[in-house]
Image (tube, rainbow, N blue to C red):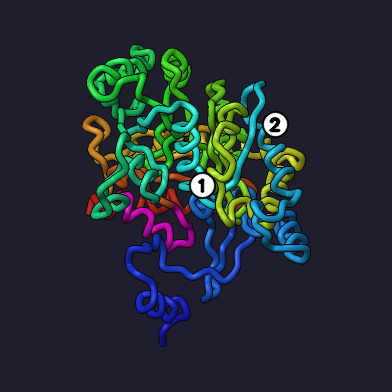
Amino acid sequence: MSSRNEELMQLKNQHVPQGVANLSPAFISKARGAIMVDVDGRELIDFAGGIGVNNVGHCHPKVVAAIKDQAEKYIHTCFHVALYEPYVELAARLNELAPGDFAKMTMFANSGAEADENAIKIARYATKRPAVIAFENGFHGRTLMTMTLTSKVKPYKLGYGPFAPETYRIPYAYCYRCPFGMTYPACKASCADYLEEFFINHVAAEQTAAIIAEPIQGEGGFITPPPEYFAKLQAICQKYGILLIIDEIQTGMGRTGKIFAIDHWGIKPDLITTAKSLAGGMPLSAITGRAELMNMSHAGGLGGTYGGNPISCRAALAVLEILLEDGLLNKADELGAKLTARFEELQKTHEIIGEVRGKGPMLALELVRDRETKEPAGAEAKKLTKLCFEKGLVILSCGNHGNVIRVLMPLVITDEELGRGIAILDESLHELSAQKAG
């Protein structure tokens, strides 16, 4: 007799295209905090967080209450047609929170890809320049522009070209696998200086509207640059009048222990994009930037029918209250310290873990077959996610070689749930090692 999960999977395979991939075979019936329950009643500890969407947890009571309250008032008017307070209130709040003591403005869209797409539009309009520079290992979305900016070809770009013109790509500060063959800290993040050479051989600085970067590369493997990197990068941008766009779609809203991850580097970007955990599971993204840049586009040049939906804006206001007034941001710091200690213990025990990296509770384990050669253990990472799932833990792999295990658990996770999850990960790593030995 088939299970309900199996029945639904058959239905899914019949009616949903394979391009819409699935990372686990579980259909969820309910979820609270850091726990999901599938349609067969099986409990799963969530270390994926809907790919970084559920920082405040599944169905946080304050988010649910805000959604219900707003849904009973009005669901949609289109901000372009009939305005409403939640849009303006949330914009003001994000302008206040974003780094920099200059005047800011915010507009809303629906997804991270839309946010990055609009940030590029704003940058090009403001600078009257066509070119945009992104980074190797970066991920910015699946629209034409953001798919072009995204680095990894398969599965994100394969067969979907031609791509948007005037986009360029440079190496990122991947210290564990330095593309320039240097060693940190001796190099002092001199990889940022490569940008000057790039302007000679690839695209002139005078043609470049913006550089777009994730503070910590998400899909690329939680690649975390050294302390000096962003200061150098911004100095070069300012030298040539190039705008710095920071993509906080996965890193923002407390994921690294701060509202914006770029605050770890003390940088004040020209434009910041947010989405994912911004609205606690509701579709919403934001573009926040210097007022003079944001306000430059002509009336009607920016926007969209659903952008800044009132229910999503109310949910986002609740998220900010939970993070800032209810102390969840402080809990994120505590969680990051616990996770770092536990992951460093795992690294000592398991030779397959080549590096532990990230900031706060946004951490990853890079798996390698040999610590000296750093050969990526992509197949092993895939097996590990499967082993963990079988034991009741949902984790994600990422990175160009699929060999990085990342954790994006809700920040509300309890110590007991965290302990169970780490124990499953440890047990699965031991099992993986035994399979290799056998």
Please tell me in which quadrant of the rendered image residue 337 appears.
top right
Q: What residue type is labelled 1?
A: Leu
Instruction: Give percent across and percent down for residue 307.
Output: 59, 52
Instruction: Give percent across and percent down for residue 318.
Output: 72, 49
Q: Which corner quadrant holds the N terminus?
A: bottom left
Please tell me in which quadrant of the rendered image residue 19 appears.
bottom left
Tell me the residue that label 1 is attached to: 408
Secondary structure under tag 1 reads loop
User: Where are the magenta residues, as a range?
Assistant: 381-395
For residue 25, above or below residue 398? below
Instruction: Give percent across and percent down for residue 285.
Output: 56, 47
For residue 414, above or below residue 19? above
CA separation in Å, label 1 and label 2: 26 Å
> Tag 1: Cα neighbours inside 10 Å, few (<14), some, or many (≥20)?
many
For residue 325, above or below residue 430? above
| Number of the label disc, if any, that sits on residue 96 | 2
Picture residue at 35% right of the left edge, 42% below the top:
150
Q: What residue type is labelled 2?
A: Glu
